[in-house]
């Protein structure tokens, strides 16, 4: 998909995203996909939370190593988000 010109979105207000060249299309796409990225990271966080909270993984009881690994991954994910001044709430 190649973008040219100006793109306008109306969703809870008005957002105008301007770009001047084909080279900027990746940045434009990233800006447009940010909400989907947040949703994907949220889903991952919730899957890790379920493993830690309920001790279930892939339809079976999780091993202690899997629970510990999920907890560490979730903590690391939160650290990374914090470094970027982002949160999932």
Image (cartoon, rainbow, N blue to C red):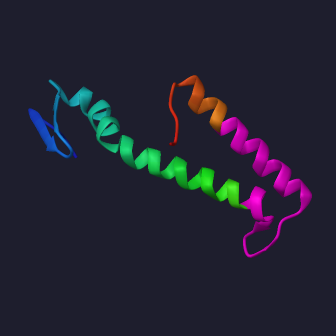
x%, y% of residue 10?
15, 45
State yes or no: residue 57 in magenta: yes
Q: Is residue 63 above or below residue 5?
A: below
Left/right placement of residue 62 relative to residue 48 reads right
Residue 81 picture location, percent across and down: 57, 32
The answer to which image quadrant residue 34 occupies is: top left
On screen, residue 27 versus residue 44, left or right, reads: left
Q: Position of residue 66 (x, y in %)?
A: 83, 56
Q: Image height check: is 63 above or below 40?
A: below
Picture residue at 15% right of the left edge, 43% below the top = 9
Residue 26 quadrant: top left
Q: Nearer the viewer, residue 3 or 75?
A: 75
**Disc count in the image?**
0
**Residue 77: x and y, percent?**
65, 38
What residue occupies the far right of the structure in this picture? 64
Q: Extreme bottom residue here?
A: 59
Residue 61 lies in magenta, yes or no? yes
Query: Secondary structure of the magenta portion, mostly?
Result: helix
Residue sitting at x 64%, y 58%: 47
Decide which of 77, 7 is in the foreground and name it.
77
**Which residue corresponds to the image point at 20% horizontal and 30% vertical from the top-left?**
22
The segment highlighted magenta reads 51-77
Quadrant in the picture for residue 35: top left
């Amino acid at each position: 998909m190649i973008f040219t010109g100006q793109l306008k979105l109306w969703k809870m207000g008005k957002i105008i995203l301007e770009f001047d060249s084909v080279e900027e299309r990746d940045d434009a796409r990233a800006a447009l996909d940010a909400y989907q990225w947040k949703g994907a990271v949220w889903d991952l966080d919730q899957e890790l939370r379920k493993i830690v909270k309920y001790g279930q993984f892939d339809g079976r009881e999780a091993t202690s190593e899997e629970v510990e690994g999920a907890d560490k991954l979730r903590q690391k994910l939160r650290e990374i988000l914090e470094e970027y001044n982002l949160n999932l709430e």
